[in-house]
C-alpha cells in the first residue's frame, strides 16, 4: 500500500524540554507518495537572513482516513483544479485544518463552566433512525422516494373515486400495502436493534471525578470537561485528552480495532507537565483550546494551559471513543468531545449507495412499458369515445350507460352513471390505467431485493472464498450491485497488501556504497548468536522470529569504530533502530528453540509493535545485527548495541508525511553530540544530500562514489521488486540546534497550519545530509495472483495497477505477477512539466498509431469487442527509425503504459485527459506508479466518465478508499493494513485470488440470473395485461374485467412470484468448474447476452403472440356455448399461470428439488386459491371452478393454449441452438455430455472436422460463435455435423474414438 495509507498515529520520542508534535503522515517505509514528486521536495532553506521558506502551498494533509479522503496539498489542488470531475460525490473531501476563529474551550475538571452556554452535546449517542412517533411518517417518506411507489399510490387513490372504481377499493390497496408493510417491518426490526444497541451503550458505566473522588457514572451523563478514569481492557466512553497513566512516563497502549479495524497496539502519551497532577485531591484546573469536532481520526490540534505554561497537544495525546485500553493499568483523561461529536460517531456515515447498471437499463425499459401503457389506455379511451358517439341514441336503454332513472322516487328522471362524452373518455383513460396497472411491475422491486439477498448468502457461504490465514469470509456489504460483477471490464488494483502479502522481510542493504545480503539466508548458529542475541549483563534478547543475517556485514559491525565504513554501518543500523515509532514488547520466553548455551542464561524474548510492517521489519533487522531497541519512553530510547546499553535523548521527531516523504529524529548522544537521523523515499532523501561542491578535500571523490553506488543498488533492488529506503544523517551545530528548537516550539504550539509549519521546521535540519546507505525489503506476491490476473485477462478484463511504489519496483512486480509480459512494448511517461507531458503523450500516440476516440459518439461497435481493445494499432503507420518490418513488429506488439504520479499532476487536466485516455485504452496494461489517493480516484473516473464500461477497484488500505468509492464496484481486502478499505467497500474478501471466482463464477451467475429475472417479469406482467386489453376491446371498451379482483391482485404477489425468486437465486447455466476453466465465457456479460434492448423487443413480440393465443383460443372454443363470463375468467386465470410457469420451466438450466416444488407448486397453489375464492358465496364467480373442472374441454383448452403459445418460442430456441449456438450453449452441451476432455485432442478435432486456431483470437459473436476458449479448448467454425455428433448422434465407428479419449 502507499504511504498515504497506514498513517502513523503514534509518537515515540517526546522530550520535556523540546516536545514534538508529529505531522500527520504514514510510515516512512511505504513507497506511495504525494501526487507530486521530485521538484516539490523540501530543500534546505536559504541561509541569508535566516529566513524560513514560506510553504503556504503545502499546508494541507495528504492522507485519507477510513471514511474520507482529505484534501491534498493546495499545490496539487492548483494543478488539478481544472479537473473537478474527480471530485465525485462518492468521495468526500474535507479540510480538517482547524480555525482559530472559534476554538473549543474545555475547562479541565469544570464541566459546568465548560457547558455554561449548553453548546456541547452530552455523551448520549443515537444511531437509530426512528422514534415511535416518527416511524410511520418518516418511513413512508423514505419509501416513497421510489417513483414506482408513487405511481401505485396514485393508482390506489384513483380507484377510490366512484367513477373509477374498477376493482374493489380494499383490493386495490393490497399490493401497495403489502410492499410497504414488508419494507416497514424490515426497517422497523433493524431500527429496533439499533435502539437496543444504543441503550446498551449509553447505560454503560465509567469512573468520573466527582467531589474529589472517582465515582461510577453512566456514559450518557458524562459531559465535556469532566475527568474520567479508564482501567485496563475497558472501552473509552468519549474522546479524551490524556492527563496521566499508570506508567511513570505517561504512556498508554490502546487498541483501535473498533475504530479503524487495526489490531496492533498504538501508543498515546500524557504530557509530562500534566502527569504531576494529584487526582485524588481534585484541586486542579486548566484550559484546553482545541479544534471544533471533525471526522479526521488521525489528527488532533490543540493547546493546553496548565500552571502558567502553554504547551501543544496532538493526535498522540488523545484517546478516542470506542478504543480499548491495553497493557496499561489505568489512564485518566479530560473529555473534549462527547456523544455525537466524537470522531467515531462523526465517521459513522455509510458508504455512498450505488445502483447497478442493469437496473439503470431496466428503468429505460420501464419507460417503454409506460409508453405502451399510455398507448393502450389511449386506445381504450378513444374507442370508448367512438363507441359512445356511435350509440348515443341507445344509451338510455343500456344498463351501464343509462342516463335517467326510471324507477319511482326521488331519483326518478335524474342522470345515472353518465358524465358526458368528454368526461367519460377521461374516466375511461384513468380506469384503463387502473386495470393495466401491473404493466409496471411493482413486484419486480421486491423480487430483485430478495434474489440479491439470496445470491449474497451463497457468495458469503462459498467455502472457496474463505481465507483460513486471516479467518475471514467473503462479505457482501452492498446488495444493490450483485449483477454488476458479471460485466466488469476494468479492474483497478493496489499493489502492496492487495497483490502482495504486505509481510515485509529485510533482504538487501547497501552500506557506504557496498552491497550486502546476497548470502541470505544464513543459518550458522554461531553467527545467529552473535547477531541476534546480544549479551547484556547476562541477559539475552531473542527475537520472536528468526532472522537470517549476512556474515560479512556482521563482521564489519564488530570491528573497532576507526574506519569510515564501520562508522557508517554503525550509524546506519542506529538509524534503523532509533528513527521509528515502534514499541518494544518484552515477554519471558520458553526454552523451546533456544541453543544449548541459551538454556543456562536469562533469556527474554522481545517483539515489536508498529503500525507499519515495513517499520517492524527494519527494526527487527537492526536487532538481528545487534542493535536492539529495548526501551522507549516519552523522552528517550535505549538501544542494546552488541551488549552495551546506549541511552539516547530524543529532542524531537518529525514523522513521515506525504509531502516530505521522509522521517527524521533529533537525538543527543551521551557525549552531548547531537545528530539528525533521516530515512525516507529515495527521491526525497537524495535531493537533500550534501552537494558535491560542498564536500571538501579528499572526501569529495569518496562521497560521490558512495552516492553513485547507492543509486545503482537502489535501481537493482527495484528491479528485483524490493521496496527501497534511503538512510542518511548529519551532525547539528549548536547554532543550528538552537534555531531548530525555537522554530519547532513555535510550530508545535500553533493551532493553525501546524503541519505546514512543522514541515518548515523540518527543512531546517533535513538538508546537507551524508548518505549512509539504503535498504531493500521484500513483499512477496500473494498466492494465486499471476493465475488470477491471467484468467481475468482471458476473460476480457483489463487490469490496471495503481501503486505508490517506485517505477522499477512496480515493473518488477508486474512481470512477476504476469501483468507485464516480455513481448509487450512499454510506453513510459515521466514528465516534469505540462509541456513535457503533452509531448510525451503526443510522441507515444504518433509512434504507435493511436487515434483519438470520441467516447459514446462513435466507434461504439469497438466497445463490444471481447478483447476490449477500443483502438487498434495500425502497422502501416510506420516509425521514423528502423526498418519497415521492425516497425510493424513493434506496432503489432501489445502495449503497456507506465506512468508516474508526477506526470498525472499535469495530465489530469481537461486538455490532457483525453490524450491520456486515448493512449491508455489502446494498451493492454496500465501501470501507475507514485500515485496519491486522489490520483487513484482520478484514474478510475477517467474511464468511468468517458465510457460505459463497468469498473472495479480493489485495495486494502485507507489510501484506496477514494478509488474504491469512485469505482462502480469496490472490493476491500482484509489484510495487514486494517479495515479502512473494507468499511468503504461493496464487497470484501481475504485474498486477491478470490477475485477470479467472484467475477468469473458468481458475477457470471448473478448477471445471467438477474438479466433473465427482469425480462421474465416484464413478460409475465405484460402477457397478463395484454390479455385484459384484448378482452376490453371486445366488451365495448368498458374497462370491465372477467377476472375477480383477488385473482388480479394475487397474480404477481402469490401465483407467479415464488418460482421467479427461486430461479433467480439458484439457477446456473454452467458449473463453477467450467466457468473457471474457460474464462472466455465471462465475455457473455460484456456482450450483454442476458439483457439488452434486442432481447427486450423479442420478449415483447413473444408476449404479444402469447397474449393473443391466451385470449382467443378460449373465445373460439366456447363461442357457441352458454359459459358465463366468470367461468371464462377462471379459465384465463389458470391458463396464464400455467403458461408463464411452463415458459419459465423451458428456460431453467438447473433443476433442483426446490425448483420443482416452486414451479409446479405455484400452479397447484393457484388452483387451491381459486377453489377457495370460488367457494365464497358473496363473490360473483361462486362455484364456477367446480363446474369447469368436470369438463374435458376445459383441460383441452389449457393444453392448446400452452402448446400454441410456446410453440414459436420453442422453434426459435431449436433453430438458434442448432445453427447459431452461443458459447454458453456449446459449453453447457459439452458439460451435459460429460465429455469436455475429448475436445482438447487434435485427434478428435481432425476426426470430427474441428479446426484449431491460435489462442490469441478474440470471440466475435457474429463469426466465432462456436469458439469456446483459447486455452486448451478451441472450437472455431465448428461444422454442423460436429455439432450434431456432439449432441449425441455419434456414428458407431466414432464411438470408439470417444472411448479412447475418455
Image (tube, grey):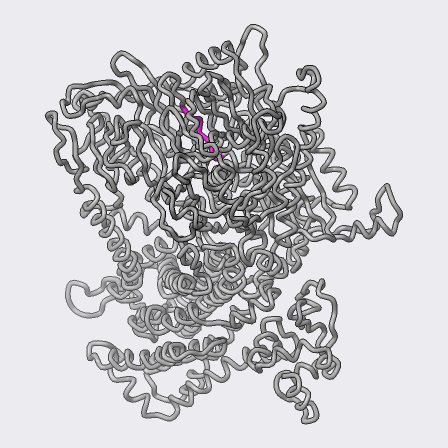
Q: Position of residue 823 (x, y in %)?
A: 74, 53
The answer to whether residue 824 is left or right of residue 68 is: right
Of 1073 and 556, nearer the camera is: 556
Which range of residues does the magenta coloring cover?
A: 21-27
Q: Is residue 437 visible?
A: no
Q: Position of residue 292 (x, y in %)?
A: 33, 26
Q: Position of residue 141 (x, y in %)?
A: 30, 48
Tell me: residue 473, above or below residue 1184: above
Outermost residue, top side: 49
Tell me: residue 595, above or below residue 1090: above
Main SS class of the magenta portion in the image: loop
The answer to whether residue 1275 is left or right of residue 408 is: right
Q: Is residue 931 visible?
A: yes
The answer to whether residue 1193 is left or right of residue 511 is: left
Q: Position of residue 1106 (x, y in %)?
A: 49, 76
- Identify the residue shown where x is 26% and y is 23%: 275
Picture quadrant where residue 917 is located: top right
- Residue 749 forms part of the magenta stretch: no
Of 696 and 912, nearer the camera is: 696
Picture quadrant where residue 645 is located: top left
- Identify the residue shown where x is 69% and y is 38%: 829
Which image quarter holds the C terminus? bottom right
Of 1214 and 1046, nearer the camera is: 1214
Tell me: residue 754, above or below residue 1251: above
Amino acid at each position: 500500500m502507499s504511504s498515504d495509507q497506514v498513517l502513523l498515529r503514534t509518537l515515540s520520542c517526546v522530550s520535556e524540554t523540546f516536545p514534538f508534535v508529529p505531522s500527520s503522515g504514514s510510515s516512512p517505509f511505504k513507497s506511495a507518495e504525494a501526487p507530486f514528486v521530485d521538484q516539490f521536495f523540501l530543500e534546505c532553506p536559504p541561509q541569508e537572513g535566516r529566513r524560513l521558506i514560506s510553504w503556504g502551498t503545502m499546508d494541507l494533509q495528504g492522507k485519507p482516513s477510513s471514511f474520507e479522503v482529505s484534501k491534498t496539498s493546495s499545490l496539487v489542488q492548483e494543478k488539478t483544479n481544472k479537473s473537478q470531475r474527480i471530485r465525485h460525490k462518492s468521495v468526500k473531501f474535507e479540510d480538517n485544518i482547524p480555525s482559530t476563529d472559534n476554538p473549543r474551550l474545555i475547562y479541565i475538571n469544570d464541566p459546568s463552566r465548560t457547558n455554561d452556554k449548553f453548546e456541547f452535546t452530552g455523551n448520549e449517542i443515537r444511531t437509530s433512525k426512528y422514534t415511535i412517533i416518527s416511524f410511520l411518517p418518516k418511513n413512508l417518506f423514505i419509501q416513497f422516494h421510489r417513483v414506482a411507489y408513487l405511481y401505485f399510490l396514485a393508482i390506489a387513490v384513483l380507484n377510490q373515486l366512484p367513477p373509477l372504481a374498477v376493482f374493489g377499493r380494499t383490493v386495490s390497496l393490497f399490493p401497495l400495502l403489502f410492499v410497504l408493510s414488508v419494507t416497514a417491518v424490515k426497517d422497523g426490526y433493524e431500527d429496533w436493534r439499533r435502539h437496543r444497541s444504543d441503550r446498551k451503550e449509553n447505560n454503560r458505566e465509567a469512573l468520573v471525578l466527582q467531589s474529589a473522588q472517582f465515582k461510577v457514572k453512566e456514559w450518557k451523563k458524562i459531559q465535556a470537561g469532566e475527568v474520567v478514569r479508564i482501567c485496563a481492557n475497558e472501552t473509552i466512553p468519549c474522546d479524551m485528552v490524556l492527563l496521566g497513566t499508570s506508567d511513570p512516563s505517561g504512556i498508554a497502549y490502546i487498541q483501535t480495532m473498533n475504530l479503524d479495524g487495526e489490531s496492533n497496539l498504538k501508543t498515546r502519551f500524557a504530557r509530562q507537565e500534566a502527569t504531576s497532577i494529584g487526582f485524588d485531591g481534585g484541586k486542579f484546573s486548566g484550559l484546553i483550546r482545541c479544534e471544533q469536532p471533525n471526522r479526521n481520526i488521525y489528527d488532533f490540534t490543540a493547546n493546553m494551559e496548565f500552571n502558567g505554561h502553554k504547551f501543544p497537544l496532538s493526535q498522540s495525546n488523545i484517546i478516542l471513543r470506542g478504543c480499548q485500553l491495553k497493557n496499561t493499568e489505568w489512564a485518566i483523561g479530560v473529555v473534549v468531545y462527547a456523544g455525537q461529536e466524537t470522531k467515531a460517531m462523526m465517521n459513522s456515515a455509510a458508504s455512498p449507495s450505488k445502483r447497478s447498471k442493469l437496473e439503470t437499463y431496466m428503468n429505460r425499459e420501464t419507460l417503454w412499458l409506460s409508453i405502451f401503457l399510455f398507448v393502450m389506455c389511449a386506445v381504450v379511451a378513444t374507442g370508448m369515445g367512438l363507441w359512445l358517439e356511435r350509440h348515443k341514441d341507445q344509451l338510455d336503454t343500456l344498463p351501464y350507460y343509462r342516463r335517467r332513472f326510471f324507477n319511482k322516487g326521488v331519483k326518478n328522471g335524474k342522470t345515472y352513471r353518465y358524465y358526458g362524452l368528454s368526461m367519460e373518455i377521461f374516466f375511461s383513460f384513468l380506469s384503463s390505467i387502473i386495470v393495466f396497472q401491473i404493466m409496471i411491475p411493482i413486484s419486480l422491486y421486491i423480487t430483485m431485493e430478495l434474489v440479491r439477498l439470496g445470491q449474497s448468502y451463497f457468495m458469503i457461504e462459498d467455502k472457496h472464498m474463505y481465507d483460513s490465514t486471516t479467518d475471514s469470509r467473503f462479505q457482501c456489504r452492498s446488495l444493490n450491485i450483485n449483477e454488476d460483477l458479471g460485466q466488469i471490464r476494468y479492474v483497478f488494483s493496489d499493489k502492496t497488501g492487495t497483490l502482495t502479502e504486505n509481510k515485509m522481510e529485510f533482504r538487501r542493504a547497501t552500506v557506504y556504497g557496498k552491497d550486502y545480503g546476497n548470502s541470505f539466508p544464513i543459518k550458522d548458529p554461531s553467527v545467529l548468536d552473535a547477531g541476534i542475541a546480544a549479551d547484556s549483563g547476562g541477559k539475552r534478547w531473542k527475537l520472536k522470529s528468526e532472522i537470517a543475517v549476512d556474515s560479512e556485514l556482521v563482521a564489519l559491525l564488530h570491528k573497532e569504530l576507526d574506519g569510515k565504513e564501520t562508522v557508517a554501518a554503525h550509524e546506519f543500523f542506529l538509524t534503523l533502530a532509533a528513527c521509528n515509532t515502534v514499541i518494544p514488547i518484552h515477554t519471558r520466553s520458553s526454552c523451546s528453540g533456544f541453543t544449548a548455551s541459551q538454556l543456562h542464561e536469562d533469556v527474554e524474548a522481545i517483539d515489536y509493535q508498529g503500525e507499519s510492517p515495513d517499520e517492524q521489519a527494519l527494526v527487527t533487522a537492526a536487532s538481528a545485527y545487534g542493535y536492539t531497541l529495548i526501551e522507549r519512553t516519552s523522552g528517550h530510547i535505549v538501544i542494546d548495541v552488541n551488549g552495551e546499553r546506549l541511552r539516547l535523548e530524543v529532542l524531537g521527531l518529525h514523522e513521515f508525511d506525504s509531502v516530505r516523504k521522509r522521517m527524521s529524529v533529533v537525538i543527543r548522544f551521551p557525549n552531548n553530540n547531537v545528530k539528525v537521523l533521516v530515512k525516507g523515499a529515495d527521491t526525497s532523501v537524495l535531493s537533500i544530500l550534501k552537494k558535491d561542491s560542498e564536500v571538501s578535500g579528499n572526501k569529495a571523490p569518496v562521497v560521490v562514489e558512495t552516492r553513485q553506488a547507492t543509486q545503482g543498488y537502489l535501481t537493482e533492488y527495484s528491479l528485483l521488486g524490493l521496496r527501497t529506503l534511503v538512510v542518511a544523517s548529519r551532525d547539528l551545530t549548536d547554532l543550528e540546534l538552537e534555531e531548530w528548537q525555537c522554530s519547532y516550539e513555535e510550530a508545535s504550539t500553533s493551532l493553525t497550519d501546524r503541519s505546514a509549519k512543522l514541515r518548515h521546521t523540518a527543512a531546517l535540519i533535513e538538508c546537507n545530509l551524508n548518505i549512509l546507505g539504503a535498504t531493500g525489503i521484500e513483499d512477496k506476491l500473494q498466492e494465486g495472483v499471476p493465475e488470477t490476473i491471467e484468467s481475468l485477462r482471458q476473460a476480457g478484463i483489463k487490469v490496471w495497477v495503481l501503486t505508490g511504489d517506485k517505477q522499477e519496483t512496480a515493473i518488477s512486480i508486474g512481470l512477476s505477477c504476469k501483468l507485464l509480459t516480455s513481448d509487450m512494448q512499454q510506453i513510459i511517461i515521466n514528465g516534469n512539466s505540462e509541456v513535457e507531458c503533452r509531448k510525451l503523450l503526443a510522441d507515444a500516440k504518433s509512434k504507435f498509431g493511436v487515434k483519438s476516440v470520441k467516447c459514446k459518439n462513435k466507434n461504439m461497435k469497438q466497445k463490444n469487442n471481447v478483447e476490449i481493445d477500443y483502438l487498434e494499432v495500425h502497422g502501416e503507420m510506420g516509425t521514423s527509425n528502423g526498418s519497415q518490418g521492425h516497425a510493424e513488429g513493434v506496432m503489432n506488439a501489445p502495449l503497456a503504459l507506465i506512468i508516474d504520479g508526477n506526470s498525472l499532476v499535469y495530465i489530469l487536466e481537461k486538455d490532457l485527459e483525453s490524450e491520456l485516455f486515448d493512449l491508455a485504452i489502446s494498451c493492454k496494461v496500465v501501470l501507475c506508479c507514485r500515485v496519491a489517493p486522489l490520483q487513484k480516484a482520478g484514474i478510475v473516473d477517467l474511464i468511468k466518465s468517458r465510457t460505459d464500461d463497468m469498473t472495479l477497484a480493489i485495495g486494502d488500505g485507507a489510501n484506496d478508499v477514494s478509488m474504491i468509492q469512485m469505482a462502480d464496484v469496490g472490493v476491500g481486502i482484509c489484510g495487514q493494513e486494517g479495515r479502512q478499505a473494507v468499511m468503504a467497500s461493496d464487497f470484501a474478501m481475504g485474498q486477491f485470488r478470490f477475485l477470479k471466482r467472484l467475477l468469473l463464477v458468481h458475477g457470471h451467475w448473478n448477471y445471467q440470473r438477474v438479466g433473465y429475472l427482469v425480462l421474465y417479469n416484464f413478460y409475465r406482467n405484460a402477457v397478463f395485461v395484454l390479455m385484459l386489453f384484448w378482452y376490453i376491446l371486445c366488451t365495448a371498451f368498458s374497462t370491465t374485467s372477467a377476472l375477480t379482483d383477488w385473482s388480479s391482485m394475487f397474480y404477481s404477489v402469490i401465483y407467479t412470484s415464488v418460482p421467479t425468486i427461486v430461479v433467480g437465486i439458484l439457477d446456473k447455466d454452467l458449473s463453477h468448474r467450467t466457468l473457471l476453466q474457460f474464462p472466455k465465457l465471462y465475455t457473455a456479460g460484456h456482450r450483454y447476452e442476458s439483457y439488452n434492448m434486442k432481447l427486450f423487443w423479442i420478449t415483447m413480440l413473444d408476449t404479444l403472440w402469447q397474449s393473443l393465443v391466451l385470449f382467443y383460443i378460449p373465445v373460439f372454443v366456447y363461442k357457441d356455448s352458454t359459459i358465463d363470463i366468470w367461468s371464462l375468467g377462471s379459465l384465463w386465470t389458470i391458463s396464464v399461470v400455467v403458461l408463464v410457469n411452463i415458459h419459465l420451466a423451458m428456460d431453467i438450466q438447473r433443476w433442483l428439488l426446490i425448483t420443482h416444488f416452486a414451479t409446479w407448486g405455484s400452479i397447484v397453489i393457484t388452483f387451491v386459491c381459486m377453489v377457495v375464492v370460488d367457494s365464497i358465496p358473496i363473490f360473483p364467480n361462486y362455484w364456477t371452478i367446480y363446474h369447469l373442472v368436470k369438463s374435458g374441454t376445459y383441460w383441452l383448452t389449457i393444453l392448446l393454449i400452452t402448446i400454441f403459445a410456446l410453440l414459436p418460442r420453442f422453434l426459435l430456441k431449436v433453430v438458434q441452438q442448432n445453427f447459431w449456438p452461443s458459447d454458453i450453449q456449446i459449453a453447457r452441451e459439452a458439460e451435459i455430455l460429460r465429455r469436455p476432455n475429448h475436445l482438447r485432442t487434435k485427434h478428435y478435432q481432425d476426426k470430427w472436422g474441428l479446426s484449431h486456431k491460435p489462442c490469441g483470437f478474440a470471440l466475435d459473436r457474429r463469426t466465432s460463435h462456436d469458439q469456446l476458449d483459447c486455452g486448451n479448448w478451441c472450437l472455431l467454425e465448428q461444422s454442423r455435423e460436429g455439432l450434431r455428433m456432439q449432441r449425441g448422434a455419434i456414428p458407431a465407428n466414432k464411438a470408439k474414438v470417444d472411448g479412447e479419449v475418455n
